[in-house]
Amino acid sequence: MRPPQTARIRPPANAASSATSPPSNSSDWLVGSRRARNAYLDRLARHTAPNRRYPRIALDNKQEGRVVTRVTITRDGELIDARIDQSSGWPAIDAAELATIRRSAPFPPVPNDMPGDPLILILPINYDLSFAARNR
């Protein structure tokens, strides 16, 4: 059973971004920054994965959902802030993802070719029962 939710626009499932603005309109910079950002976000995903725990209450109640966190870090990877940007609809899943972020700090240093200080990262993650079953 899922709690009622208000309609909202959801970014694509593979969306992850860093909230920085380019220093110029150079298409070379945009291509380079996109590659750097994507590589760094992939690195963060690998870094946080071992710290992720599916909440027992969510497993027992067959709760799944996509939670999006807004994480602010310094260039050297220190966590400044982590908050829910978009709820999964399940408090236990939202809390578990915030706990994952906090357990994962500090993060790898930000690559030199990624602008911003501090960096605000938008990190989506799906809590899926089939994934939980494979990782018990």
Image: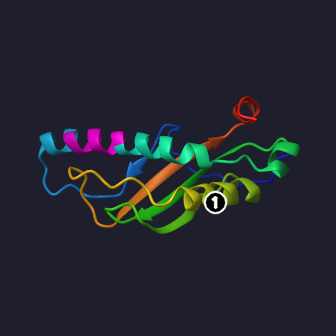
Q: Which residues are magenta?
A: 32-39
Give x and y (percent) for residue 84: 59, 61
Residue at image mark 1: 99
Q: Is residue 13 above or below residue 54?
A: above
Give x and y (percent) for residue 98: 61, 60
Which quadrant is the N terminus positioned in? top right
Give x and y (percent) for residue 59: 82, 43
Query: From this viewpoint, which residue is outermost toward the bottom?
Result: 80
In the visual, does 91 lie left or right of 104?
right
Image-quadrant location for residue 23: bottom left
All told, the count of numbered labels is: 1
Which quadrant is the C terminus positioned in? top right
Towards the viewer: 63 or 112? 112
For residue 19: magenta? no
Towards the viewer: 20 or 49? 49
Identify which amino acid the numbered label 1 is placed on. Answer: Ala
Q: Residue at x 25, y 52 (%)?
A: 114
Q: Residue at x 20, y 50 (%)?
A: 113
In the visual, does 58 lie left or right of 65?
right
Does residue 52 appear in this view? yes
Image-quadrant location for residue 29: top left
Q: Residue at x 71, y 33 (%)?
A: 135
For residue 33: magenta? yes
Query: Magenta region, mostly helix, strand or loop?
Result: helix
Give x and y (percent) for residue 33: 24, 45
